[in-house]
Image (tube, grey):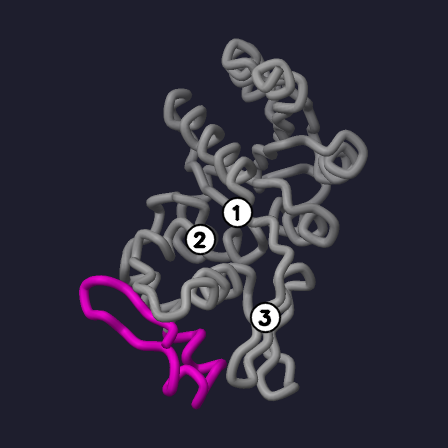
Amino acid sequence: MTGTKRIETSRVLVVDDEPQIHRFLRPALEAAGYTVLRADSGAEALRLAATLVPDVILLDLGLPDMDGQDVLVKLREFSETPVIVLSARDRESQKIAAFDAGANDYVEKPFGLGELLARIRNAFRLITTGQGLPTDVIEFDGLRIDEAARRVSLDGAEIHFTKTEFRILVILARHPGKLVTHDDILRAGWGGTHVYDRTHVRIYIRNIRQKLGGFAERHLRTRPGLGYIFE
């Protein structure tokens, strides 16, 4: 029963305006057991994401009607579906912007089919384990993290965090007193991708420290070479 249910519900929405991408991906995804949905524009992608509710979205950033970054922002207003960006844009700033807009992973074109299928399997593991589906409110020492609403406040004052900063803050707060390694943070912030390294983790931690001010000075500890602890 479990296997049958997975085949029925494992739908991958491919959003790309290049017909050759669809011709390349559809047979490979169907052979891997997925049902493939197709969108050639941002507007169509948003409509299908809302009506057919795919399990994973493969999103190109260069769409004819709107930029893929804008599609991500609009999508995250109503959906937590894992999104894997497929793009020829290889600048670091563009990748960071995609993650901050809500992407879970980023694969550069041209890409290998085996790697892409592995990234999709990882996205399904995020769904299975419930990561990225927040339901709790975390509170201590004046800090309040509302995971469902994606809101953070400190002593009653709301603080804005980017989506990536929020994911990192949540995994730290979920494990008070325990070491959260650099790899743990990479998985939480970027869905398991290896686009980034520890340097980028440190940049995001620094941003979080600055926004939390004295709270971070009291509670966020660095373990050099290992990771971080919320005490």
Q: Foreground residue, 156 or 28? A: 156
Q: Which residue is mark 3?
A: 145
* Kind of element beneath mark 2: helix
Residue at (35% x, 68% y) in the render = 203
Q: Earlier in the sequence, mark 1 or mark 3?
A: 1
Q: Where in the figure is residue 95, as x and y percent of width and height?
A: 45, 51
How far is mark 2 from mark 1, CA to CA? 8 Å
- What stretch of residues is rendered in magenta? 206-231
**Chain-order first, disc 2 or disc 3:** 3
- The amino acid beneath tag 3 is Ile
Quadrant of residue 168 within the rendered picture: bottom left
- The CA span between labels 1 and 3 is 16 Å
Question: Does 30 sit left or right of 181 as displayed?
Answer: right
Q: Residue 47, how many percent across, how many down?
A: 79, 36
As drawn, the label of residue 203 is: none
Mark 2 or 1: in front is 1
- Answer whether labels 1 and 3 touch (C-beta < 8 Å): no
Residue 6 in the figure: left or right of residue 178: right
Q: Camera-side residue: 212 or 103?
A: 212
Contact, CB < 8 Å: mark 2 with mark 1?
A: yes
Relative to 120, 151 lies left or right: right
Q: Residue furthest left?
A: 225
User: Which residue appears at 43% of the width and 74% of the height?
Assistant: 207
Disc ID at residue 131: 1
- Residue occupied by mark 2: 188
| 208 in the magenta segment | yes
Circle 2: residue type: Ala
Confirm whether the magenta stretch covers residue 154. no
The quadrant of the picture occupied by the N terminus is top right
Q: Amino acid at mark 1?
A: Gln
SS type, badge 1: loop
* SS at badge 3: strand
